[in-house]
Image: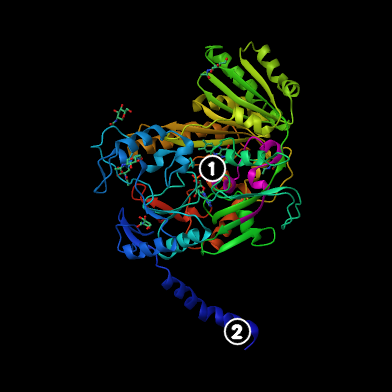
């Protein structure tokens, strides 16, 4: 037999056996009848395939007692949860007081800041006779302390066909860090940080770097970097409490230094991860390069559980900042107000070409810019860069107020001008990324579209402006970006499924629709985007999508990881009113 024949022989006769033996080891998907069809689903507690108490106890032993059955935080405000007494007035007062706090929420086992995704079945209340149920929270959570705990969780979910959720800080706007009936792995305890003066690992980069545990949050990391000598800084998000190594980097990660240094995913030198097969791996320019590429912007919670990430650091530099307001105290004339906003937003290319990042909140009749960030600028320089805006506002007779500040370091600016935001919002989120060409050619149309959107949380950010281009999975359109906005719709706490569907449709069509139409070269951002974004594969990843989909099939063939609208998830859907995760029916 020739070698080639032997190859084909073994492939044809042995492959089915190899595949079958795997399938025997790991349970198959579970049949579930819904809407007159039989779906193949993950296993849930109400199913026969669910592991026995003994099996869960074994897992608990493996993870050194860090497995917990989830009890919603607000259960202490109710007489009972699942038949067990839970009421505790002191604890309830604490939960009620802290429920809107980002840091408090981040430190919980499974809390989701955007409570819509918990199904609001156990909110803080003054009525203990009300009903508290699990809603869309996970069933169990592993508060992982070591990488072995993560491995045990991944293996358990894979072998028992249980939906796995990776939860770090719970910031996810799109509810990807919670999931009905799932096993969650919480990575928020991984707080190790190690600065490296001169990077020697693969990739050829020899500057400063830092290895950051998965649980570290933005401001926490900036604070540690600021204690180094010389003071260091890096690309984090504008939000002080967003996790650094979790969803943020895996989705791309923009922030106050992004127009200056590029996206957070552009800074990555190496990841330590646990992949869907339960193996621990170090991935970088030398090992598993394809996975390394995908983890840099290819989608949160999609390819592996990140244990730590190594990224570039930069020596901190002076910075200047400006706070600008145009609101009802200045004018109640709508036409004038929108002229002011147009003057500001149409200069987006100018801001990013000067290395600036701008964070703003737009409400009807109110523009609050806090702040314009000018890295490596002083008061004089940033005022000079601002001049075209001030000239235009003067020309249009738009009243405004500004406050110009300068700081010895970017860190000082960050602490002074970026603040915690609120958690606990019951809202759907959408968004749109505009390119420089969109701003130059359709600036006024974009402003018109904002008038219909009712408001936006805006970021003027141009990560392709000054930074060298890096080969990674972020949408290449990011390299042309100039402005990125988040939109949202708030819902009543008692919104029904039908109300939610109506709101979602309105968000996609009436709010994001005009923004999309006004930006033919634009894109969308997976971390801050619309779950029903039309053609989301292209909107979120552009030309990188086909490769990402293939890599998902390679690295997670069984769909151990699931986060909505990430590569490969077109094969799956959540049915039964937000409950069961199943293979999609065509
Ligand atoms: C108030 C606010 C401000 C924000 N500001 C910015 C900003 O300035 N720039 C920006 O780019 N984004 C920003 N975001 C979006 C943010 O980047 C995403 O929500 C991000 O996914 C949060 O990641 P996390 O790990 O902190 O949160 P989580 O909600 O815990 O996780 C988010 C996603 O990442 C996955 N994940 C978490 N940890 C891991 C891990 N260790 N390994 C693998 N997957 C993991 C989860 O499964 C989930 O899919 C902001 C969000 C909020 C709510
Ligand atoms: C796991 O073990 C710890 C420590 O013994 C215990 O407190 C916890 O309740 C156990 N978890 C479960 C789900 O039984
Ligand atoms: C009630 O909650 C408080 C605050 O969390 C705690 O100190 C106390 O032990 C709890 N009481 C009981 C009976 O569990
Ligand atoms: C989620 O909320 C809807 C609307 O209130 C309700 O009909 C449904 O039963 C809830 N599902 C779960 C699992 O909580
Ligand atoms: C309006 O602008 C003023 C500054 O001129 C500021 O003090 C105030 O907080 C702003 N109001 C709102 C609602 O943003
Ligand atoms: C970026 O903009 C340039 C110039 O307008 C254009 O040629 C290129 O195709 C754009 N890239 C992407 C990915 O849209
Ligand atoms: C839901 O709550 C709002 C107030 O938040 C109230 O106006 C409305 O009537 C409630 N709807 C239902 C169906 O209970």
Tell me the distance, in whole angstroms, between the alpha carbons under discs 2 and 1: 48 Å
In this rendering, is residue 12 above or below 377?
A: below
Ligand 5 - quadrant of the structure image: top right
Tell whether circle 2 marks a residue whose Cβ is less than 8 angstroms from ligand 1: no
Q: Position of residue 402 (x, y in %)?
A: 63, 17
Q: Position of residue 489 (x, y in %)?
A: 44, 32
Is residue 255 covered in magenta? yes
Q: Is residue 323 visible?
A: yes
Label drawn at residue 100: none
In this rendering, is residue 137 above or below 146?
A: above
Is residue 469 covered in magenta? no
Q: Position of residue 73 (x, y in %)?
A: 36, 42
Q: Which residues are magenta?
A: 247-271
Q: Is residue 119 visible?
A: no
Tell whether circle 1 marks a residue whose Cβ is less than 8 angstroms from ligand 1: yes
302 and 380: which one is in front? Answer: 380
Label drawn at residue 527: 1
Q: How is the image coloured?
A: rainbow
Residue at which label 2 appears: 6
**Residue at 66% across / 15% down in the picture?**
393
User: Which picture quadrant has residue 58?
Assistant: bottom left
Left or right of 257? Residue 216 is left
**SS of the residue under disc 1:** helix
């Amino acid at each position: 037999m020739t070698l080639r024949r032997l190859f084909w022989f073994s492939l044809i006769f042995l492959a089915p056996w190899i595949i079958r033996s795997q399938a025997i080891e790991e349970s198959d998907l579970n049949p579930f009848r819904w809407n007159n069809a039989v779906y193949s689903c993950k296993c849930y507690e109400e199913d026969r395939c669910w592991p026995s108490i003994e099996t869960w106890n074994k897992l608990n032993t493996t993870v050194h007692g860090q497995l917990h059955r989830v009890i919603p935080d607000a259960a202490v405000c109710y007489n009972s949860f699942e038949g067990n007494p839970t009421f505790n007035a002191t604890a309830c007062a604490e939960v009620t007081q802290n429920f809107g706090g980002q840091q408090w929420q981040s430190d919980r086992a499974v809390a989701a800041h955007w409570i819509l995704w918990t199904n609001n079945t156990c909110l803080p209340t003054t009525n203990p006779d009300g009903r508290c149920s699990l809603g869309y929270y996970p069933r169990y959570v592993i508060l992982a302390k070591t990488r072995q705990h993560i491995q045990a969780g991944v293996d358990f979910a894979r072998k028992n066909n249980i939906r796995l959720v990776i939860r770090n800080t719970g910031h996810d706007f799109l509810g990807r860090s919670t999931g009905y009936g799932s096993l969650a792995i919480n990575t928020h305890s991984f707080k190790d940080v190690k600065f490296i003066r001169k990077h020697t690992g693969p990739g050829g980069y020899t500057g400063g770097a830092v290895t950051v545990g998965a649980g570290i949050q933005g401001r926490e990391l900036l604070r540690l970097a600021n204690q180094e000598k010389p003071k260091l800084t890096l690309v984090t998000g504008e939000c002080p409490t967003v996790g650094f190594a979790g969803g943020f980097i895996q989705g791309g990660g923009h922030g106050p230094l992004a127009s200056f240094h590029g996206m957070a995913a552009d800074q990555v030198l190496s990841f330590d991860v646990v992949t869907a097969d339960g193996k621990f791996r170090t991935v970088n320019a030398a090992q598993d390069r394809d996975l390394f590429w995908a983890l840099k912007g290819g989608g949160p919670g999609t390819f592996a559980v990140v244990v730590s990430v190594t990224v570039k650091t930069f020596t901190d530099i002076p910075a200047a900042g400006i706070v600008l307001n145009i609101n009802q105290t200045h004018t109640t004339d709508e036409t004038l107000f929108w002229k002011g906003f147009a003057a500001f937003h149409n200069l987006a290319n100018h801001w990013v070409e000067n290395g600036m990042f701008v964070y703003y909140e737009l409400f009807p009749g109110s523009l609050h810019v806090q702040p314009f960030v000018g890295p490596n600028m002083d008061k004089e320089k940033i005022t000079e860069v601002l001049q075209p805006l001030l000239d235009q506002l003067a020309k249009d007779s738009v009243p405004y107020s500004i406050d110009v500040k300068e700081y010895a370091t970017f860190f000082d600016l960050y602490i002074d001008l970026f603040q915690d935001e609120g958690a606990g919002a019951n809202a759907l989120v959408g968004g749109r990324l505009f390119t420089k060409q969109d701003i130059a050619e359709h600036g006024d149309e974009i402003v018109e579209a904002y008038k219909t959107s009712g408001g936006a949380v805006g970021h003027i950010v141009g990560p392709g402006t000054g930074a060298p281009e890096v080969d990674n999975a972020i949408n290449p359109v990011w390299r042309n970006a100039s402005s990125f906005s988040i939109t949202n719709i708030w819902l009543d706490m008692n919104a029904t499924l039908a109300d939610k569907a109506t709101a979602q449709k309105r968000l996609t069509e009436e709010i994001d629709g005009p923004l999309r139409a006004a930006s033919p070269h634009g894109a969308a951002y997976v971390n801050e985007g619309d779950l029903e974004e039309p053609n989301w594969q292209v909107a979120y990843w552009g030309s990188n999508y086909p490769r990402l989909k293939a890599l998902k099939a390679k690295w997670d063939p069984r769909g151990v990881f699931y986060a909505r609208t990430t590569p490969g998830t077109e094969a799956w859907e959540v049915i039964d009113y937000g409950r069961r995760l199943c293979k999609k029916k065509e």
